[in-house]
Image: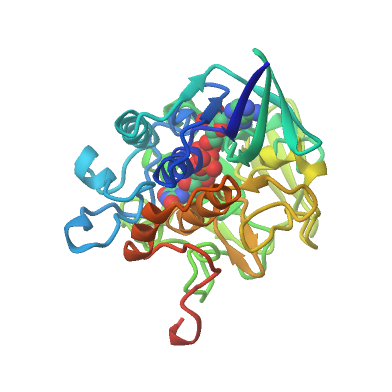
Amino acid sequence: MEQVDVVVVGAGAAGVGVGVALKHAGIEDLLLLDRHGVGASFDRWPKEMRFITPSFATNSIGMLDINSVAIGTSPAFTLEVEHPTGQEFAKYLRGVSTFYELPVRSGIDVKSVEAKGDRFLLTTSKGEVSAKFVVWAAGEFLYPQTAPFVGAEHCVHNALVDSWETMTGSEAVVIGGYESGVDAAIHLARRGAEVIVLDRNEDPAWESESSDPSVALSTYTMERLLDPAIADKIMLEGGADVVEVRENGQGFEVVCRSGDVFRTAQPPVLATGFHGSVTLVRDLFEAREDGLPLLSEQDESTVTPGLFLCGPTVRHDNHVFCFIFKFRQRFAVVAKTIAGRLGLDAEDLEVYRQWGMYLDDLSCCGEQCAC
Ligand SMILES: Cc1cc2nc3c(=O)[nH]c(=O)nc-3n(C[C@H](O)[C@H](O)[C@H](O)COP(=O)(O)OP(=O)(O)OC[C@H]3O[C@@H](n4cnc5c(N)ncnc54)[C@H](O)[C@@H]3O)c2cc1C
């Protein structure tokens, strides 16, 4: 059986980013295993969907491009676009992976991870691997929540849409009013459809006063919503908690808890999120009150030493690390911890601090924040 120091599961934004940090920490006995290949989730985004976070080549002044996963790299510089598509961003990730010579193995599906003594046994589609440390970075996008209520099988999840061109109806219902749902509505409206977006929250993202883009809609999306060419084609309905979708022969009925019913001829769009890949390793973590993995200050499992989590599922208190510019802050913390346990001094990681990234703490803007 193959034995290595560190296995990173997943070669998306988190896997590639933490892989580079592990290399900067001096770790060479490393493997990145990916079910498909580098950037596979981004390659599967609907083709019209673009990053909401803008890229800008700020590196020359010591500030990392907001969508960068590795110090010194910039999607804006590489791709020459401000809001990359998923396919474009996947190209950037492949460039980073090649430049840093990350040891990625594609086409390897990790089926399970077991703690065995002071090592981990990973069972994969291509045999077993033993590792001293595992970094779980398998993301959320390939694990959509496709059954949030009765009749959800009549809907199409936005993560499974290749292109909004395939939805040709003159009206549409979108369930879920955060970024993915509103993005779907914008593209459907641009194609000429009258769109209703339903969100269960009384205080939905489009009305939120929060300065946190993990809660409120991004400026990029708000600007697009206000475009006069589509503004009157999109109806936003908060407090609409969908409990069932029925097929009635001519189309679909979307039934809300309030008793309101919305009708549409084409399958409603589900933009209700993801259950995420952590379902595969849930038993190896304690759960927080919200059900997500409880992590130490080094993003390690509190019950399975040596197992770390990287990516959008990371939470600390009420901090949600769901964007790249948030979860990349944790890469060097994880790399430094693993390097320390392997007896490496990882002094090259000090440069991460100069790029504004965390190295050994949970810092945020704290009291200086005017948010
Ligand atoms: C619709 C959408 C839009 C977003 N827009 C933005 C944005 O504009 N800006 C921003 O900063 N963030 C955005 N995000 C958030 C963030 O960028 C993504 O969540 C990002 O893809 C997370 O990176 P990741 O590496 O954790 O997961 P992924 O990119 O999903 O990578 C996970 C990798 O793991 C592999 N994998 C999965 N399971 C296994 C397994 N069992 N075995 C082996 N390999 C496996 C997959 O093939 C994949 O390559 C968006 C997220 C979504 C869903």
**Quarter of image, res 202:** bottom right
* Left or right, residue 198 beside residue 247: left
Residue at 74 percent of width and 58 percent of height: 294
Whether residue 81 is situated above or below residue 105 in the rendered picture? below
Numbered label tally: 0
The residue lying at 57 percent from left, 37 percent from top is 141
Name the one closer to the observer, 106 or 318. 106
Residues 206 and 86: in front is: 86
Q: Residue furthest top?
A: 126
Apparent side of residue 52 relative to residue 141 in the rendered image (left or right): left
Residue at (21% x, 53% y) in the render: 57
Image quarter hosting the N terminus? top right
Displayed quadrant of residue 267: top right
Residue sitting farthest toward the front: 343
| 210 to 141, vertically: above or below | below
Q: Is residue 145 above or below residue 261?
A: above
Q: Residue extending furthest left?
A: 60
Q: 256 or 33: nearer the eye?
A: 33
Q: Nearer the viewer, residue 272 or 296?
A: 296
- Answer yes or no: is residue 313 visible: yes
Q: Position of residue 335 (x, y in %)?
A: 51, 49
Q: Position of residue 302 (x, y in %)?
A: 76, 56
Residue 160 visible at all: no
- Residue 250 lies, in percent from the top left, at 68, 28
